[in-house]
Image (tube, grey):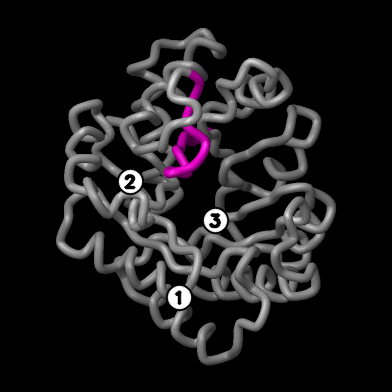
Amino acid sequence: MITDTHAHVFWKDFDGDRDAVLARALEEGVDRMIIVGTTLETSRQCFELCDGVAGLYPTAGVHPHDTEGVDSKVLDEIEALCRKPECVAVGETGLDYFKEYSPGRDQRRGFRWHLELARELDKPVVVHCRDANRDTLELLREVPGVRGVMHCYSMGEEELAPYLELGMYISFSGSVTYPRNAANRAAARAVPLDRILVETDCPFLAPQGKRGKRNEPAYVKLTLEHIASERGVDALEFAQQTSDNATRLFGL
């Protein structure tokens, strides 16, 4: 059993072979995927894609890139999706100051809204953080009682402690396999075994050996095996542990 805890297989990149992509994932033992929404439109697509399909679980949220101009009507519809029993998490949300496609004030407003909703619903929140460590921690601390995952964790070991203290799970993508990403690998070795998750963030961030290609859920097995090797543990046991962690966090 392998769980890809962050996949965007609704993306247009998969329009030509989505069924084959899902079949390849199953062949590699990836039998569960969290399908993560980033806008109102894609959140709706997540629910449509997951409807009646075993092992696929939807979320709903507005990515920090898309927070500019988001009005109450959109948020009301996101909230309605998050309230559905099949929705396993709120988000993707968070902060991204690297590209800052939306102004920081809009990102922070959107992030706080998602955090408060997640707390109200007692559902985990899926957090994106890029070049925004200080503000991300500040907002998480301002809304205590929220549980969730730092998706595609890209920082090092020294930044881990505050997130672990807040009860967050830490998820690693294919970028942990990149040769120059030693700091991220150190973090992957340091996360407690009961708090670590794996993901693809597909179609982005294909692991080493597939780099430059479209990422897909089957490739999460490569990331999992790489981290297991770094930690000196059996890959099958690590697959079971990360899946158990996903079950616990997302209520699968």
- Which stretch did the figure color magenta? 195-208
Task: Name the spot of residue 148 as percent of width and height, x first.
Answer: 56, 53
Describe the element under mark 3 as helix, strand or loop. Answer: strand
Describe the element under mark 1 as helix, strand or loop. Answer: helix
Instruction: Please tell me which residue lies in front, 40 or 144.
Output: 40
For this view, does 158 lie left or right of residue 14?
A: right
- Residue highlighted by disc 3: 126
Could you tell me if the residues under marks 1 and 2 are in contact, i.e. CB atoms within 8 Å?
A: no
Task: Name the spot of residue 220 as percent of width and height, x first.
Answer: 40, 30
Task: Name the spot of residue 165 as percent of width and height, x first.
Answer: 72, 44
Q: Residues within 10 Å of mark 2 (few under 14, many from 20)?
A: many
Query: Of the residues under marks 1 and 2, which one precedes in the sequence?
Result: 2
- Residue highlighted by disc 2: 33
The three-letter amino acid code for the residue at tag 2 is Met
Q: Quadrant of residue 144?
A: bottom right
- Residue highlighted by disc 1: 40
**Residue drawn at (45%, 49%), measured in percent from left and top?**
249
